[in-house]
Amino acid sequence: MPLQNRVTPFGDIIATPERGLFTGNRGIIHDPTSKTLLNKRWSNPAWITCVCDFRGRRRDVMATRSWTELFFFDEATAFAAGHRPCFYCRRDDANRFRTAWAQGNGVANVRASEIDRVLHAERLDGRHKRLHPLDDPIGALPDGTMIAAAGASYLIAQGRVWQWSFAGYRAVDADLRNAQLLTPPSMVRALRAGYQPVRHESANAPH
């Protein structure tokens, strides 16, 4: 039976057999004896996205009182949930993200802790996902942005709208007039400044 450790673009953590391209964490939020989540959904404001394979290291998932391994369909999904690149296992990506985030948000010499502080306010509304109004037309959003409408999530990529699922993206022609922004606004500005999150290959396939 799959563990409850797959993250949706809404930031919810569910159990599903589908695998993801990235792992990451929000601190320690599980009981290692039962390998189940605690009531809390984060214990640290540094929500990060990590590579699944790093220097050949292996972890028994949720087995110890260490960080709780979470898994993401792709980096665009992780961004929507509010997770940034890890500065340890993804240093090059993290530095590119920091540069784009600083440029997009009009700051200089920004620290990871400062990015985390902004993101933490943007991604949560109490215990729930914070949705944001769309300030731009959907067609003007940068690639990698995710939006929500009628309980579903959608990726903007290659000038098209792709409906998200753990099984893959599907290009759609949907009425999204009441859509809201899932990806935190400061991250959208980093995307506009040039950072390109890793997308699952299904968002590149012809439809």
Image: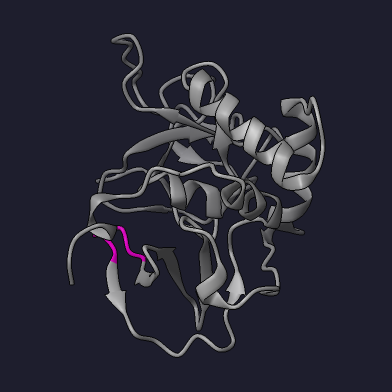
From the top left corner, tell me how far across and down residue 52 is, in percent: 34, 27
Q: Quadrant of the C terminus?
A: bottom left
Q: Is residue 99 above or below residue 90?
A: below
From the top left corner, tell me how far across and down residue 94 is, in percent: 56, 27
Task: Indicate whether residue 94 is drawn in magenta.
Answer: no
From the top left corner, tell me how far across and down residue 15 is, in percent: 36, 52
The stretch of residues the image draws in magenta is 164-169
On the picture, is 197 further left or further right than 86? Answer: left
On the picture, is 32 further left or further right than 46? Answer: left
Magenta span main SS? loop
Residue 33 in view here:
yes
Q: Residue at x 36, y 63 (%)?
A: 158
From the top left corner, tell me how far across and down residue 82 is, in percent: 60, 48
Residue 29 in view here:
no
What residue occupies the far left of the structure in this picture? 206
Task: Indicate whether residue 166 is drawn in magenta.
Answer: yes
Q: Indicate the quadrant where residue 67 lies.
A: top right
Q: Indicate the quadrant where residue 152 lies.
A: bottom left
On the picture, is 195 further left or further right than 19? Answer: right
Q: Residue at x 39, y 43 (%)?
A: 198
Q: Is residue 12 above or below residue 193?
A: below
